Amino acid sequence: MESTGSVFLLAAAAAAAPFNWALLLNGVQLCVIIGATLIAYVTYRDAQRREKTNNSFHHIAKQTRDHDVIQMFEEFRRVRSELRDGHEGAFGLKQVEGKVIDHHQRALNAEDVVKKVFNYYEATAIGMKQSALEEQIIKDWWRRSYVLDWTDFAAYVREKRERDGAPKLYVEYETYVKRWANHDERPDI
């Protein structure tokens, strides 16, 4: 009974006290601050998303316009084609290291060519991991070649990791390959 009486006394005191407009204004100000913060956050996230999308399309455009990138992939295709001649399965150190291939009367070191392309793929994977590139856009554009190029040279990378004591060599690239590979491709990864 005593606690019920205390509640009635508090209610009577609150009813008798004048209304505190300052508390209401503080509440309105708080709502405005919270609202402005939410709007700022949504705007920031939207700008991040747009920047990531723009970066992704710029990355793709570079592959179709930049002469050096185009040449790098052309050389890579030439190296793979030469290495494939008479060889089945993934390429290992034995197939790649020390191989020099003629390409438009230029000598291509197979290892250097693979390294350039895989460094490019690794940089792309890091860009996706760090949210600088939109994974779904890059995947839609590149998935097949990204996975097949890894499949062809996975043994080479693994052997190189072990021999050189570099366990993290191209691990970000490999992570996305494993994520993107379909059921039929997984046994070769």
Image (tube, rainbow, N blue to C red):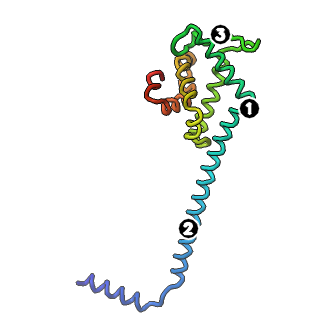
Q: To which quarter of the image does residue 41 belong?
A: bottom right
- Are circles 3 and 1 on residues that touch, CB within 8 Å? no
Q: Residue sitting at 61 percent across and 29 percent down?
A: 121
Residue linked to disc 3: 99
| Marks 3 and 1, the one that precedes in the sequence | 1
Q: Residue furthest right?
A: 105
Q: Residue furthest top?
A: 86
Quadrant of the drawing holding the N terminus: bottom left
The three-letter code of the residue at mark 3 reads: Lys
CA–CA distance in space, label 2 to label 3: 64 Å
Q: Residue sitting at 65 percent across and 20 percent down?
A: 76
Residue linked to disc 2: 35
Residue 97, image x, y percentages? 62, 12
Q: Is residue 60 above or below residue 98?
A: below
Q: Nearer the viewer, mark 3 or mark 1?
A: 1
The three-letter code of the residue at mark 2 reads: Gly
Q: Residues within 10 Å of mark 2 (few under 14, many from 20)?
A: few
What mark, if any, has residue 1 been given in the picture? none
The three-letter code of the residue at mark 1 reads: Asp
Q: Is residue 154 above or below residue 97?
A: below
